[in-house]
Image (tube, rainbow, N blue to C red):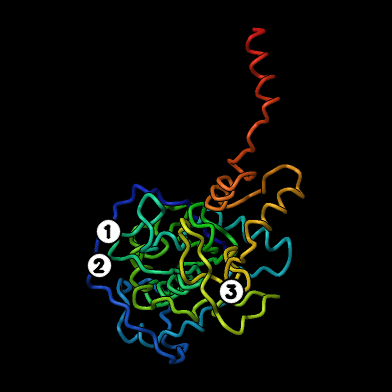
Amino acid sequence: MSHARVEELSDSDPEIEDLSSISFPASSSSIIAPADIPQPSTSGRPLHPSQNAAQNYNPNSMPSLLRPTGPNAKAATKESIKSYSTLYPVYFDASRTRAQGRRVSSKLSVHNPLARDIAEACHFISTRMAGGQIQIAFEPDKLHPKDWANPGRVRVLMRNKETRKLVSPAVKNKSHLYILVAQYLQTHPTTKESPLKLQIQGMPAPEKLEPPAVPRGWKINKILPLHSPAMSGGGVSDNFFKDMMADMQKGGGGSVPQLPPGMAGMLGRAGGGPGGSRPASSGEGSKKKDKKKGK
C-alpha cells in the first residue's frame, strides 16, 4: 500500500472560531473494544465524535508512534512525514500570546499543554472521527524556537499530495484540527502526573515530580516533560548558569550550538554567552581610535 504524503497547509486557511456542537467528555479507564473503533468505508462519516465514544476512549490504547527499527527505517520515516502538518504545545498554551506562538483563540487555550497529550488528542480524532485514516507521528525531541523548555511535537497527515484531497472530511483544514485538539485538551487537562505518561528509555521516572525552578523573567510552564532541558533533578539547578558558562568556555568559542533563544538571551545578558560580549580593554579601545585618526 502506498503511503500518501501531504504538503503543509497555509497559515492563511480560514480560521474556525467555534465548534460548539463538538464536545469531549472526560475519558474513563474503560478499555476500547475493537468493534468500537470506526472502520474506513466509502459511506459518509459523522464529523463529530459520539459522547459514548469519547467516554470509552482509553489513552493507553494509543499505539507507539514513529518507532523505526533501524537507521535506514528511521531516515525513511522522517522523510515520509516531512510534509505532514505540525503541531507544537505552544500553539495551545494559555500563557502565550499570538505573537509568542499561540495559534488558537484564548478561550480554546489550555495551561501546561504537552506534546504527548496532543498526540493522544490526534489519535482520538483519527480513530473516533476519521475512521483511522489520519496518520500521526510523534517526535518527542523536537523543540519550537519560541518554547525551548517544552520539547515534543506531533505531525499529522491531512491531505493527499497527488490528489490534493483531504484524507478525511472529519478535519476540514489545519485551523479545524487546532480547534479539535484544543477542545480535547480542555476536557483532558494536564496534571502533575501527566509527564509520567511519556517514558523515555534510559531515563528512570523520578520518585517525586517537582516543578521546574523558573528564573525571573523566563516564561516556563509549571508542568514539563521529564526530558525538558529546563528539568534537572526537579528543576533548574542553583549552578545552572555557572555550569553553562563553564561548558561554553571549554568549547573555546564563547557560544553553545543550538542554544534555545530564551536561554541564549539570558546568558547573553549575563555576559559571555551568545549576544553578550566582554567589554573591550582600554588598550583595545585606544588602538581603534588610533586607526580612525590614521584614516
Q: Residue at x 49, y 57 (%)?
A: 147
Q: Is residue 59 left or right of residue 168?
A: right
Mark 3–mark 2 distance (CA, rounded to whole Å): 39 Å
Displayed quadrant of residue 233: bottom right
Front disc: 1 or 3: 3
- Tell me the crowding category of disc 2: few under 14, some 14 to 19, or many 20 or more residues within 10 angstroms, Cα based: few
Mark 3, residue position: 234
- Tell me the crowding category of disc 3: few under 14, some 14 to 19, or many 20 or more residues within 10 angstroms, Cα based: some
Label 2 element class: loop
Q: Residue at x 44, y 57 (%)?
A: 159
Report the amino acid beneath label 1. Ile
**Location of residue 138 in the rendering, given as x and y in whole percent from the top left corner:** 55, 67
- Give the farthest residue toward the bottom: 30
- Tell me the crowding category of disc 1: few under 14, some 14 to 19, or many 20 or more residues within 10 angstroms, Cα based: some
Report the amino acid beneath label 3. Gly
Q: Are marks 3 and 2 in contact (CB under 8 Å)?
A: no
Q: Which mark is residue 16?
A: 1
Q: Does 274 appear above or below 116?
A: above
Would residue 276 be visible to someone looking at this image? yes
- Give the farthest residue toward the front: 282
Displayed quadrant of residue 32: bottom left
Front disc: 3 or 2: 3
Q: Which mark is residue 19?
A: 2
Q: Residue at x 54, y 57 (%)?
A: 148
Report the amino acid beneath label 2. Leu
